[in-house]
Amino acid sequence: MKRANPEVHFAHYLALLKMFCPAVNGLIVFDQDASQIWQDCDQPIDQDQLPSLLPNFLRADIDSHVQDLPNGEIVELIKLRQQAFDLPLVLAVSTGNKSRSSIRQIATEPAFTRLSEMLLADYCQNIRLAAREAELTEMADELSRRYDELNLVYKAEDQAVNLHHGRDLLRQLVTNSASFLKVDVVYLYIAGKDIAMHKYRNDNPVFHASDLFETMRAKVYPLLMQEVSPMVVNNPGERRQRDIDPDLPFKFVACPVINAEGATIGLLATASQDFAAGDFSDSDRNLLEVMSKKASKIVQSHFDPLTGLENSHSFELILKDLLRKSCDRGVSHAIANIDIDRLAVVNDISGREAGNELIRMVAQKMTEMVRAHDLVARLGSDKFGILLKNCDLMTARVIMKKVSHAVSSLYLEWEGRRHEVSISIGVAPIGRETLSVSTLLDEAETARNVSKQRGRNNIHVLEVKDSNLLQRKEEIRWVGQIQDALRDGRFQLHAQLIEPINATASHPHYEILLRLLDNDGQTVLPGSFIPAAESFYLMANLDLWVINQTFQELSEMYRDSSRQRLQVSINLSGQSLNNPYTLASYIENKLEEYRLDGHDICFEITESAAIANLAEASGFIEQMRELGCKFALDDFGTGLSSFSYLKNLNVDYLKIDGSFVRDIVADPVSESMVSAISQVGQAMRLETVAEYVENEEIRQKLVEIGVDYGQGYGIGKPILFRDIQAVMAKSA
């Protein structure tokens, strides 16, 4: 039984008891294990005698007993029961040195019965609260342990994937595996991509490691290509069975790394020397298999299968990280956009297989010609990108001339035909003035187009003045379009259904989504204009427009009393939270103006915005909740640091970040993260919403986990908000 916390009102109880029973001058409280949890006595009580009396009293079939102590004190022992067989408390009530004949038994007093019921209720309530708090604390500790372990092994989870170089991610995975698994060495080999890396335990090399690595490449990798399943080898006999040198002094586990087509393209292995204690088990194999799947995912996400180079996705992520660092440090770099001239002609004349061979040749030659710290990536069928780090435009021009000359010396012989090779190159600078990755890629592509217009085998370098002009045009275009759209009413509200999958909802629930109509009437998604709005502090204006327009359209729907009520979720930016009192006043006025019930409104705040403006966000949430509004914490779980902030944010929903949900069927890490967030939501009585529910398979997995709501194209595509009622009427 847990000890009562200090909030139990024993002192108040004693004061009332003395009022109704003046003979009482002290009280000692014990739990059912005879452990003292509270006392207050006017005169000292001989407490040495009480512990010896309590066991017999607890075993006796009586509820009260008056006891004379050796020092002349009289103490009445009383059992307080919540139910017939539940004994939460034992009271020792002191009546001092008065004669027993002059004192009535306290337990028989009517006032005592009423007071004891009050005390017992107070105590039991505190015990239940303490137990629940302990349960939540234990769950939080367990989740923290689980996250620490997952974070140790899977540093390359989706959020990390979006921040690092592909090879760095693989290197990080190998390092984490070596640290977590406590083996002598971890080895990763990806054939055809020039990837071979290892990590020793505590950076202490082992004897014959080179023999082990050679065995992995020459013997184990071909075996895994045939079996496509993990391999556990613990002794010379097992090595001999697999035609592996029995004298190799290592036991090991090896798992295949596969590509998107399911073919083995490499391996991830852990090894310990033969004399190491303990053989590798099925558990070791299973854990390594999960990590090899993570390695497979990294390879598939970041590397081009034809050339082994970084792909366009990885290249853009690397550029994004580089732009941030360049802004912080003022370092200059350059980017080159390369196009293979007349590749389509090679494909038409000699076939796509010949074209692929030409692509491989060009990729290899460019990789050989750039500096060791530069990066070559394949961006498309005949297009490449080269990142030239710490490189000014003059040096970039020299390097790319060498690359162009080297590639032009190549030729492809294919079935009796000879194909000459050349490339067109555009170069653009990367510096403080670079606005975004998309702008940078556009600049390099523009330079490459200029190069192609001049003929084959040319280089054009976009000068700084050209770059500044492009940047200014980009800024003016988006900021101008946003301001024009606000003025001309060219923003639209769309809505996407949030469906209950493990919950019941009294009203249909939709998230409000913003769209912009360009000058041609084409719909522009927010990913195109929101970054500019954030950079130039226009988000607060957009938020106010969305709130007003949502309330207006919702009010128009409600004019027909037969229309079904809705709950709508409106996203709020971090910029709006910087001025929470103005925003709260605006919302309150608009609710009154359109005569709306705050219970129909839910506001979504991203985890990062809430944490960055924690005090403001907490105050704003409380102010809005007084109006009946609900709140959702969006993109929850991206770092799991948010668990510690939940106690300070009075929200109703946790929206699980879509990066976990979209891979939940195939990725055990994503499934674990979604399950953990769902458990936290249940423990804290918060409802969970999963984003990116793209198909029925994902939806069923979420049902199994216990997520309350789902949202995504697999449930419903966004439609115009004003059309919601008509759509619901058709489906009714």
Image (cartoon, helix red, strand yellow):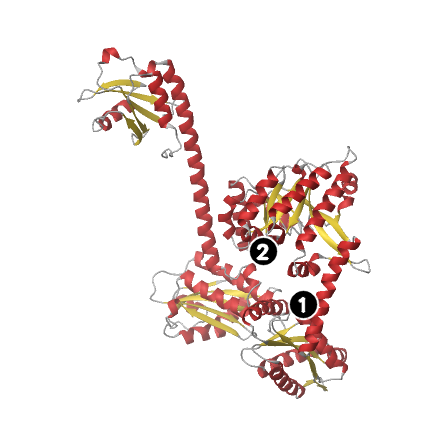
Q: State which quadrant residue 66 falls in.
A: top left
Q: Secondary structure at mark 1?
A: helix
Q: Is residue 519 left or right of residue 24?
A: right
Residue furthest left as drawn:
70
Give the number of marks: 2
The C terminus - image quarter: top right
Q: Which residue is mark 2?
A: 666
Q: CA distance from mark 2 to mark 1?
A: 31 Å
State which mark lies toward you, 2 or 1.
Answer: 1
The N terminus - image quarter: top left
The x, y position of residue 644, in whole percent, is: 48, 48
**Is 143 placed above or below 184 here?**
above
Per the rendering, the mark at residue 659 is none
Q: Amino acid at mark 2?
A: Ala
Q: Which residue is mark 1?
A: 438
Q: State which quadrant residue 339 falls in.
A: bottom right
Q: Is residue 213 left or right of residue 30?
A: right
**In terms of depth relative to the viewer, which is nearer, 570 or 52?**
570
The x, y position of residue 656, in whole percent, is: 58, 49
Can residue 499 be seen in this snapshot?
Answer: no
The x, y position of residue 200, in whole percent, is: 40, 69
**Is 693 placed above or below 271 here?**
above
* Badge 1 density bin: few <14, some 14–19, many ≥20, Cα 10 Å: few
Q: Is residue 629 left or right of residue 141?
A: right
Q: Secondary structure at mark 2?
A: loop
**In terms of depth relative to the viewer, which is nearer, 511 or 144?**
511
Q: Amino acid at mark 1?
A: Ser
Which residue shows up at 48% across the image and 72% down it? 197
Q: Is residue 275 left or right of residue 382?
A: left
Q: Work out whether mark 2 precedes mark 1 in sequence or the reverse, and give the earlier one.
A: 1
Circles 2 and 1: CB atoms closer than 8 Å: no
Which residue shows up at 58% across the image and 79% down it? 391
